[in-house]
Structure formats: structure tokens, C-alpha cells
Image: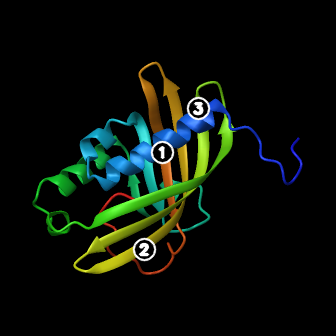
Amino acid sequence: MNKPNELSVVSPSLQLAAEFIWREAELLDRKNYQQWAGLWSDTGHYVVPIDPDTTDFEATLNYAYDDARMRAMRIERLTSGNSVSAVDAARTVRTVSRFTEVSRSADVVEVSSAQVLVAYKREIHTLFAADLTHRLRFTPEGIRLEQKVVRLINSADSLNALGFLL
């Protein structure tokens, strides 16, 4: 066990997970949603809960609870040019840090982190801060997202401008 002021050596799986999560953030900032979709497992879920403490996402109201079909529909809406929010989409910059390994098995690692997202649209900056949890599966084809949970720190407030993927 480490002493309180000692830093532990970062596990290779945590390092790979952090690099994957940074890459995911870059794809989203570049609006490269098709490549982002390729990061997911077929059974993965993207979740933005309203209740900051919920763990039962199926039984609670969420801003987003997307399986593969819903992610594809969201990406279609964001890229088709038919949605007002997509045509005039905000530019975003995400900073993700504070990576902590929550759990690990032979081929799955769960990582918590912090994200600050700045969105810019029509001369207005909007700030979103969130705790993230990524469940990542290591496969022969590469790392795949099993679940991403975005817990906005103000999720219980009235929110707007959530058209882009957090």
C-alpha cells in the first residue's frame, strides 16, 4: 500500500485507457462521429443521467441512454444537416483528466475521470463539467467502449444546448 503522499505506478491498462479516452474526446471535438461510433461495442451504452446518484439507468430518466441504434440515430441527426442544432453546431474543446481505475478484470477496465467541456456558439461560451465513467473492453481488434456515463455536475438543473455528444 502506498503512503498518502506517494504516487503509485500507473498500470498499463490505465495508461491505455487514458489514451483511448483522450482520443475519444478528440474525435468528438472534431465532430468525427463516424469514427467515434467505431469505438463502441455492439452492446455498449452511452448514458447522461439526470439523477447524479443513479446506477439503474434503464429505470430512471436520462438526458441520453443510447444503445447502438440510438447512437446511430443521434449521429445521423448530427451529421445530416436536417437538424437546426446540427447545422449551427457549437465548436467544442474537451479536457479530460484525473484518471482513476475503478475496477479491472482480465479484459475489462472501468475508469473514472473528470471532463471540462467548453462549447462556443454565436459568440457565447458554455461550460459543462462532468464526472465520466468509461467501461472499456480490450479485444484483439482493439479497445471497445462498453459503457460511457457522463454525470454532469449540474444535471438536476434545467439544461439546454445538449445536442452534441458529451
Q: Quadrant of residue 158?
A: bottom left
Classify 108 as above or below 148. Answer: above
Earlier sequence position, callout 1 versus callout 3: 1
**Which residue type does callout 2 highlight?**
Leu
Q: Circle 1 sits on which residue? A: 21
Q: Residue at x 54, y 71 (%)?
A: 153
**Which residue type does callout 1 highlight?**
Ile
**Which residue type does callout 3 highlight?**
Val
The disc placed on residue 10 is none
Q: Quick one: label 3, few (<14), some, or many (20+) residues within 10 Å?
A: some
What colour scheme governs how the chains and residues are painted in the rendered image of this protein? rainbow
Q: Circle 3 sits on which residue? A: 108
Q: Residue at x 17, y 53 (%)?
A: 79
Check the image and name the residue furthest to the top. Answer: 140
Earlier sequence position, callout 1 versus callout 2: 1
Q: Residue at x 31, y 61 (%)?
A: 164
The disc placed on residue 127 is 2
* Pick the front one: 64 or 14: 14
* Circles 3 and 2 in contact, beta carbons < 8 Å: no
Decide if residue 90 is on the left or right side of residue 106: left
Q: Position of residue 34 (x, y in %)?
A: 25, 41
* Circles 1 and 2 in contact, beta carbons < 8 Å: no
* Pick the front one: 148 or 91: 91
Q: Marks 1 and 3, how far apart in space?
A: 14 Å
Q: Quick one: label 1, few (<14), some, or many (20+) residues within 10 Å?
A: many
Q: Secondary structure at mark 3?
A: strand
Q: Secondary structure at mark 1?
A: helix
Classify 76 as above or below 162. Answer: above
